[in-house]
Image (tube, coloured by chain):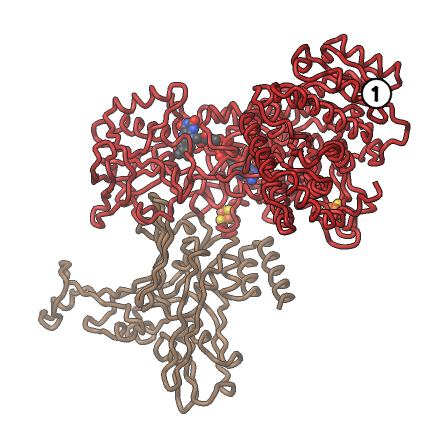
Amino acid sequence: MSQPETPSNLSTKPQTEDLRIGVFVCHCGLNIAGTVDIKQVVEYAKTIPDVVFVKENRYTCADPGQEEIRNAIKEQKLNRVVIAACSPRMHEATFRRTVSEAGLNPFLYEMANIREFASWCHPSTPQEATERAKDAVRMAVAKARLLMPLQTIEVPVTNKALIIGGGIAGMNAALDLAEMGFKVYMLENTQSIGGHMAALDKTFPTLDCSICIEGPKMVDCGRHPNIQIFAYSDLVKVEGYIGNFKVKIRKNPRYVIPQRCTGCGECKDVCPIEYPNEWDMNLGTRKAISVPFDQAVPLIYAINKDYCIECFKCVDVCGERQAIDFEQKAEEVDIEVGAIIVSTGFDVYLPYDMPLLGYGKYPNVITSMEFERLILAAGPTGGKVLRQSDGQKPHSVAFIQCVGSRDKNKYPYCSNYCCMYTLKHVVQLKEKYKEDVEVYVFYMDMRTPGKGYEEFYDRARERGVNFIRGRVSRIEEDPKTNNLTLYSEDANLGHPIEVNVEMVVLATASIPKKGSDEIARILNLSRGADGFFMESHPKLKPLDAPTDGVFFAGACQGLKDIPASVSQGSGAAARAATVISKPKWKIEPIISIVDETKCRNKTAKCGVCVDKCPYGAIKAEPNKAATIITASCHGCGTCVAECPQHAITQMHFTDAQIMAQIRAALERDPEDKILAILCNWCSYAGADLAGTSRFEYPPSVRAIRVMCSGRVDREFILEAFRLGAGMVLVGACHLPYDCHYISGNYKMKARTDALKGMLTKLGMSPQRFRVEYVSAAEGIHYAEVIKEIDADMKALGKEKIKEENAKLKPTLENMLKRWKKT
Amino acid sequence: MPFKTQKLDTAEALTLEWILQNKHYKLTLDKKQCVGCQICSLACPKEAIKIQKQPKVQGEKVKKATVDVDLAKCIFCGICDITCPYGAVKVTLNDSRNINIVEKESFPELVRNIKIDTRNCPKDCEVCVEACPLDQLTISRVTFDGKPVENLAALSPSQRRHVVVSVNIPKEKCPTCKACEYKCPAGVIKMGKIFEGKIAIDQSKCPAGCHDCVDVCPITDTLTFVDGKVQVNEATCVYCGACKVVCPIDEALTVKRTRVLHTPVHSGTWNKALERLTSPMDAVKELKSIGNKKAQEMVKKRAVTEEVIR
Ligand SMILES: Cc1cc2nc3c(=O)[nH]c(=O)nc-3n(C[C@H](O)[C@H](O)[C@H](O)COP(=O)(O)OP(=O)(O)OC[C@H]3O[C@@H](n4cnc5c(N)ncnc54)[C@H](O)[C@@H]3O)c2cc1C
Ligand code: SF4
Ligand code: SF4
């Protein structure tokens, strides 16, 4: 799919018309005017070149204030607007609307933050606060001069969705979307949808039969006119962007023609060959031609050629129907969708690598998932819990919790539902075999936070189960009886204990699904330290992937039980619908674009930007200039800072604009100033909070906003020091996961670490350049940081700073050669 | 217990296992009985069986080839068990012979046409016992009232007259060499061979003094080394091909099977096995006789492509 044209208005060349800048200074009642001397600011603004109109308002954001702006634009023929008021995080959108209502392009206006960043944080030094406000206006005007009109980008939307993974989460998402009227493709890589739930016996806490409640949903998915299932198929490739994904799917050969197979199963009856059924945890077998389980959807048989001996008995019995085709080949299908939901679930950990527990060695040590298959009436033992060693019913069973989970050496996280399913297992066992079976549960903590869950725990306790708090250190088997001895400590009693049982059930960790790395690569998703998919924001965007138009449902994003997976499925459907219900999708035009003439990739292999883009939005084909997929670009600007050729420009945050802000900030007494470049989402918000909370800090700081710390070019810092800045601060979101753009902060860190090394080698005191991680909630931290930097600056003294700067200057000027002309 | 697979290789036997919750598949190869022919490896639909020629030590008799089964490929279908002329391989499911493929008519049983009528047996004759090159054949005698005879000489003549002799041939272990039939003075045993075929030795191609084939042939006197030359007595040859496996010269020895006696079956697996046990030509012959056109074409097609590949 071709990417949407980079809109023609996205020119990187500044306007040439005569500038007519209007400046509006807000009192915000007394919020600003109580500290900042508005008169001074107004008078000062009038002296700034290109400013043709200055006006003060009591409340700029109120209707009369906005009206004044609109009138001034029209009457004064303003072509740039600067509003000195509160934080742009507060009212940037409001005033964009205001200026566009007056016919001015909404991107031809800039805010100067003189409330959170001046009056509120410097109340006891009103003159300094006023100076800071003046500088803020000058900086905003400097940027405004270079602003370019931008148009919101619109891309058409394909009103269809793809669900990857047909477990309970994916099925719910599919059904909800299908019911809303959208066409849904459902991709499942095994032979049937259903996921883990289809293999469970009962479900906690109500103990309803799992397949009885899931089966109908599976059938609904299979029958729904809006749902098309691609089972036994793999995701090959995804191209495109939100609203416009082009997906390639490979249908693996079943050697049975779906349209002809009636699911009668006569072939299975004549087939002589059996092999272990993976779906059954390999406890039972299936035929070389078969379905994994009777309720499979779609009910289409498949031949496993690894086991088939080509006797063609199935072909004979299938007869007239002619559904069997030994020549069938894998087939690739292309589909187009507007949104994708990933619901690939999890895998169960098999603890072969924990030899002290004897799994795989002692026949009567099993996992919980195997226990599910044993106690299930349709399972390989017909619902009898039997020992593998002798086929006898055990008279004592021990359940061990947290096998692999909450284990620093294996999987440090809690697997969420193991406590609950073990309680389910013990209740089932006790209800089935009554007094005939002694049950022990070894646990670390019993976690039952859920509706009706604690009550379920009580139910287990009432059944006379022995709950022992302690980790089992090892299990030994009596080779004659195959009985097992567990060695543990009883944490409540504080002494070691030994327990003899006839069977052990290990509640093993649930782990990231095999193949998640492949899915992550194809869809450009990231995975957390635990291996599960990372959501865009852990609190506010728990269903959104960092790639726009991709959403998560179920255990693939983090382990969760069935009710939570179902809810997330519906949630993800709703999120996907926000995209595919629209005919067009709007994209903020603050994206980056490549100047083809400068890109090095045309002549030499470069592609630096491709690797650095957190969204995989850049393509650099050999001997061609790199291109950025507009709709995939999130506008962090990391590539801009990384490009060795300065070939990339971020709209609305161009190099020239930011350089102009830096120069304006350091125009007067640079040695006394702290130049701060703050990322919009965390550190700028943290600085805002410092103001809102009235945490006072030294007024020596001048702050510039970028969307992401990844945008912070080395040149910005070099320029600041070249101009003589006392101190420089780069503010970012906390490592490792807070970055709004996945990993911009890491890219910034690598870049600034190297830069700092270089600057200190050149003789700069290391404390003069700082990188700080400040979250949106850490107003106090921001204030402390500025205090520290200010103190460091005072301790160094102006003379020392000047001296260092003089030493640095020739090197810096040389490094900034390309800016000489401007 | 998770699904477990295991393989054990000892001096006496090779064992492969699949252990599931309540199913236990097991393949056992009795190394003493195995003669190192290649019948099983030709019949195996999964190409799981490899015949390994043993290195020859100068001055020693050549050793019979050994058989190895690949645990990753074996599916415990039991075809090797069914086709081994010597009954050296057993495939069991939960300790009883796994003949699902036979029951589902996916594979035939080999037919050993052995007819024994012991009415004419001289009561004290043991010729057949001695004739059996594999020491499989046994004789038992009971008195008229069914009591086992301990000492024939101790019986009175009339008691002797009423002794009932039976000749016992363990069917699945008999390769039908007919040695007993030939040696029997009373024409008691009538035997049809499992395989019909042809064995030929081009003595001019044999390296001087070589008698490797003679050394490995399990059927005594079928191959003999006389006056520096190998002689063939085709009458007792079972066409298993153990000799062919060890013969160092390709053109010196040919063993061809042209027909396999088996229970009737209609199965792709068998057609392929037949083709490899005999030849595509011979397989087509059999298919013609049962009128299976489609299968004949498939065999022919395979033969052509194989030719092309070669
Ligand atoms: C032993 C055990 C007992 C449990 N008991 C209970 C219980 O009683 N009650 C309860 O609420 N919860 C229980 N759970 C938890 C429950 O299993 C999960 O909450 C639920 O299965 C999560 O659903 P899901 O759809 O997210 O994932 P899954 O069920 O894992 O489904 C994921 C689906 O995606 C498919 N898939 C994976 N990768 C790909 C790919 N690359 N391409 C295409 N398709 C793919 C899979 O094949 C599968 O069909 C239990 C879990 C275990 C291990
Ligand atoms: S051809 Fe294969 S799948 Fe069909 S019956 Fe025979 S073994 Fe089973
Ligand atoms: S980093 Fe710059 S020069 Fe290199 S490919 Fe990307 S745009 Fe081109």
From this view, report whether residue B193 is shown above or below residue A71: below
Camera sees residue A179: no
Q: Is residue B144 left or right of residue B273?
A: left
Tell me: residue B191, above or below residue A525. below
Whether residue A419 is visible? yes
Residue tagged 1: A104
- Judge whether A295 appears above or below A355 on screen: above
Residue type beneath disc 1: Leu
**Residue A243 horizontal side relative to residue B56, left or right:** right
The N terminus of chain A lies in quadrant: top right
Residue A822: image quadrant is top right
Horizontal side of residue A451 vs A254, given as left or right: left
In the rendered image of this protein, does residue A233 appear above or below residue A541?
below
Kindly indicate which chain is depicted in brown in the rendered structure: B
Q: Position of residue B220 (x, y in %)?
A: 34, 78
Please state the total of marks drawn on the protein image.
1
The residue shown at (72%, 44%) is: A619
Residue A639 lies in quadrant: top right
Mark 1 nearby-residue class (10 Å; few <14, some 14–19, many ≥20): many
Percent position of residue A19, x then y: 87, 26
Identify the image quadrant of residue A636.
Answer: top right
Q: Which chain is red?
A: A
